[in-house]
Amino acid sequence: VQLQASGGGLVQPGGSLRLSCAASGFLVDYYGIGWFRQAPGKEREGVSSVSSHDVRTYYADSVKGRFTISRDNAKNTVYLQMNSLKPEDTAVYYCAAVYGGPVNSWSQTTEYDYWGQGTQVTVSS
């Protein structure tokens, strides 16, 4: 089971980025996929998640209305479209997976079993 996050970069405030989480070794449709971020000196926090079979999507209050999570089963990839980016969105973004979940709390790191490496997102003028 492997997850690879990509798509980060430097963007100006108000700009957009689309992060990708490509999975190998398993079918993403059967897994809940979460996006987390970690800024320097801060704890890793849940940003968004999509449950297995797209039953539900979840968003942190800080990103609601700006970020959209989606899944492309044909490409075995989950995306995080980030619009209207703010400097406070600057962080390393990680994707994570849990079979059949998330079940208890989508925003807790302990909910997920597999993690990808991070991709840096920097929002700055």
Image (spheres, rainbow, N blue to C red):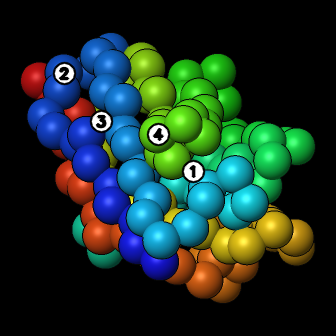
Q: Nearer the viewer, mark 1 or mark 3?
A: 1
Give percent across and percent down for residue 53: 81, 47
* Few, some or many residues within 10 Å of mark 1 (<14, 14–19, 20+): many
Three-letter code, disc 3:
Pro
2 or 1: tag closer to the N-terminus: 2
Alpha-carbon span between mark 2 and mark 1: 20 Å
Screen quadrant of the C terminus: top left
Q: Are marks 2 and 1 in contact (CB under 8 Å)?
A: no
Which residue does the numbered mark 1 point to in the structure image? 47
* Few, some or many residues within 10 Å of mark 4 (<14, 14–19, 20+): few
Alpha-carbon span between mark 1 and mark 4: 22 Å
Which residue is drawn at the image coordinates 78% and 55% (left, top)?
52
Q: Nearer the viewer, mark 3 or mark 2?
A: 2
Q: Nearer the viewer, mark 4 or mark 2?
A: 4
Numbered mark located on residue 87 in the image: 3
Q: Nearer the viewer, mark 4 or mark 3?
A: 4
Numbered mark located on residue 12 in the image: 2
Q: Is residue 125 left or right of residue 31?
A: left
Three-letter code, disc 2:
Gln
Q: Secondary structure at mark 1?
A: strand
Three-letter code, disc 4:
Lys
Three-letter code, disc 1:
Val
Alpha-carbon span between mark 3 and mark 2: 8 Å
Placement of 50 over or under 37, stated as above or below:
above
Numbered mark located on residue 75 in the image: 4
Which one is in front, 5 or 75? 75
Which residue is drawn at the image coordinates 61% and 59% (left, top)?
27
1 or 3: tag closer to the N-terminus: 1
Alpha-carbon span between mark 4 and mark 2: 29 Å
Q: Secondary structure at mark 2?
A: loop
